[in-house]
Image: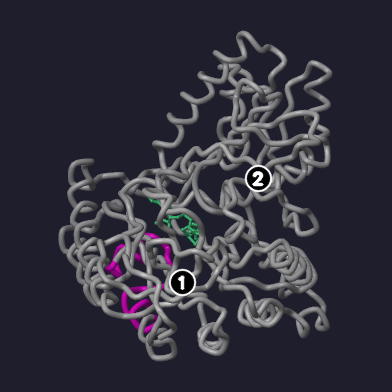
């Protein structure tokens, strides 16, 4: 099971120092990233901007001229972690005074005053839409000033920039296609920290994907807070589409069309995307996935609750019935698809009946995996301003545990159903536990671990006979094509 209680990404990726080799670099930057895939992708954009300034990346804090923390503010716990990290950096700075420490990402706006002026834990604060300004801001610091830019933009997509792939396995990569979010789910801080939704020019997406292919990558994940809402009409925020010229509107590119273009541009690559939104996903996307074998048969479709009453209070654009109707369409058009979700336990006002509806929705869908959280009030959100965070922590945790246990059972059952089958997998690299085994994924995004054979290498598509499983992993042996 990929789900876990408290973080967005598997633990080993949290706070990972990301590197790429750049032997000719004259200065070194240490970048540590927290939170969602989007943040990891942003760190690659930042590394790309800094590479042009002569910075290579390093995993060694002692060698770094510049230390950057790319932060997440989706839940409360992250903030304390960041403060502790910044204090640690200060202790290093004590014997390395020239080292510059910067805060990037979603915490920038809210914490800029505290961290820069009061606690003096950082020299630099840069919000998610201001990374292009980094070279200029670093110059200001060189002149002895503190530097800050947290302005959000209606246009910035970094579409023309070349990201530097960090911590890469050389096989899979992220490509961001939209920024920001207009959905305004009442619990969520993203629309405030990352601004209005805007889409990236499809030509630059196709160029980046082709360039990844030419470098030997075999899989891309197209990223956005709400990929189904992708809409290119020449630039600018999605909400201004109605004001665009008739010609711009007529030639607009939506998500299904983008998916088709990418699938056709790189037929030898696998294509994934994240995240889908129930109210914005339409059948045209499902038909595209059905048509192209290289579009992976896996959909991440967050639901957040199984209770229509709570979904309304969450300002989700769908109720339980809408969601289940969407699932039915997906299953009809894509019978092989694996579904995953995000779920929140203990939203304000959630009763035991609401919670039971969450469990019953999970029984109805039987997800392959999920990311599961308990509600964490975020300052400034609609829920924080209008609702009381009234579910006691121990109740939130108990409900979350029930959700996790049920998901674990479903993940195990889904995996058990694969035992005895022969599946096609893309080899990603050495398995975490043994250098004699590969780790790989099926089109459904399930991890498959199997013993290496001579001649196999990362990036190969091979067939594996599944012999055993846990809730998280399938185990097998290389097989002849099924
Ligand atoms: N659409 C986005 C969602 C970003 S937030 C995406 O691309 O994934 C990821 C998940 O964090 C949400 O789906 C939600 O389940 C969880 N989350 C967001 N705000 C939260 C909060 N205040 N408390 C608990 N979980 C939250
Ligand atoms: Fe957040 Fe809802 Fe957008 S969860 S990122 S406001 S789709």
What segment carries the magenta color?
306-326
Q: Which mark is residue 224?
A: none
Asked which quadrant contains residue 29, the reply is top right
Q: Is residue 145 visible?
A: yes
Above or below for 23 versus 424: above
Q: Position of residue 34 (x, y in %)?
A: 51, 41
Q: Residue at x 41, y 65 (%)?
A: 302
Which of label 2 and label 1 is nearer to you?
Answer: 1
Residue marked by disc 2: 128
* 19 horizontally vs 85: left or right: right
Contact, CB < 8 Å: mark 2 with mark 1? no
Q: Residue at x 77, y 53 (%)?
A: 162
Question: Does the closest atom of ligand 1 sit within 8 Å of the Cβ of label 1?
Answer: no
Q: Quadrant of the N terminus?
A: bottom left
Instruction: Give the color scheme: rainbow, by chain, secondary structure or one colour.
Output: one colour
Residue drawn at x 21%, y 73% is 363
Chief secondary structure of the magenta portion: helix
Determine which residue is flagged by label 1: 425
For label 1, the SS is strand
């Amino acid at each position: 099971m990929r789900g876990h209680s408290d973080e967005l990404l598997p633990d080993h990726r949290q706070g990972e120092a990301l590197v790429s080799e750049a032997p000719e670099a004259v200065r070194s930057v240490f970048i540590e990233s927290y939170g969602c895939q989007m943040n990891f992708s942003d760190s690659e954009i930042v590394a790309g901007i800094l590479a042009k300034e002569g910075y290579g990346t390093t995993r060694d804090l002692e060698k770094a001229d510049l230390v950057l923390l790319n932060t997440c503010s989706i839940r409360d716990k992250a903030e304390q972690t960041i403060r502790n990290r910044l204090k640690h950096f200060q202790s290093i700075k004590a014997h390395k005074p020239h080292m510059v420490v910067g805060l990037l990402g979603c915490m920038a706006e809210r914490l800029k005053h505290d961290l820069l002026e009061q606690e003096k834990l950082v020299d630099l604060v840069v919000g998610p839409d201001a990374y292009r300004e980094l070279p200029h801001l670093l110059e200001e610091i060189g002149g002895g000033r503190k530097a800050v830019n947290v302005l959000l933009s209606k246009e910035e997509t970094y579409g023309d920039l070349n990201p530097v792939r960090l911590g890469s396995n050389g096989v899979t990569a992220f490509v961001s296609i939209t920024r920001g979010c207009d959905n305004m789910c009442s619990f969520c801080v993203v629309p405030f920290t990352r601004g209005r939704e805007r889409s990236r020019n499809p030509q630059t997406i196709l160029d980046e994907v082709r360039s990844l292919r030419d470098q030997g990558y075999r899989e891309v994940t197209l990223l956005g807070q709400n990929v189904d809402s992708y809409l290119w009409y020449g630039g600018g925020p999605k909400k201004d589409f109605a004001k665009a010229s008739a010609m711009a509107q007529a030639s607009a590119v939506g998500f299904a069309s983008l998916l088709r273009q990418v699938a056709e541009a790189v037929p030898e690559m696998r294509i994934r995307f994240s995240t889908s939104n129930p109210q914005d996903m339409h059948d045209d996307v499902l038909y595209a996935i059905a048509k192209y074998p290289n579009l992976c048969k896996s959909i991440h479709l967050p639901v957040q609750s199984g209770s229509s009453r709570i979904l309304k209070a969450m300002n989700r654009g769908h109720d339980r019935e809408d969601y289940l109707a969407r699932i039915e369409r997906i299953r009809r058009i894509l019978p092989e698809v694996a579904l995953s979700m995000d779920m929140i336990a203990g939203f304000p006002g959630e009763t035991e009946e609401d919670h039971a509806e969450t469990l019953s929705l999970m029984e109805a869908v039987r997800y392959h995996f999920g990311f599961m959280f308990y509600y964490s009030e975020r300052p400034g959100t609609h829920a924080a301003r209008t609702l009381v965070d009234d579910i006691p922590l121990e109740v939130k945790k108990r409900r979350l545990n029930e959700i996790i246990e049920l998901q674990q059972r479903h993940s195990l059952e889904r995996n058990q159903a694969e035992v005895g089958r022969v599946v096609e997998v893309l080899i990603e690299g050495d398995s975490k536990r043994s250098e004699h085994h590969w780790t790989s994924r099926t089109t459904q995004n399930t991890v498959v671990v199997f013993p290496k054979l001579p001649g196999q290498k990362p990036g190969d598509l091979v067939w594996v006979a599944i012999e055993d499983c846990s809730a998280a992993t399938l185990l097998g042996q290389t097989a002849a094509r099924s």
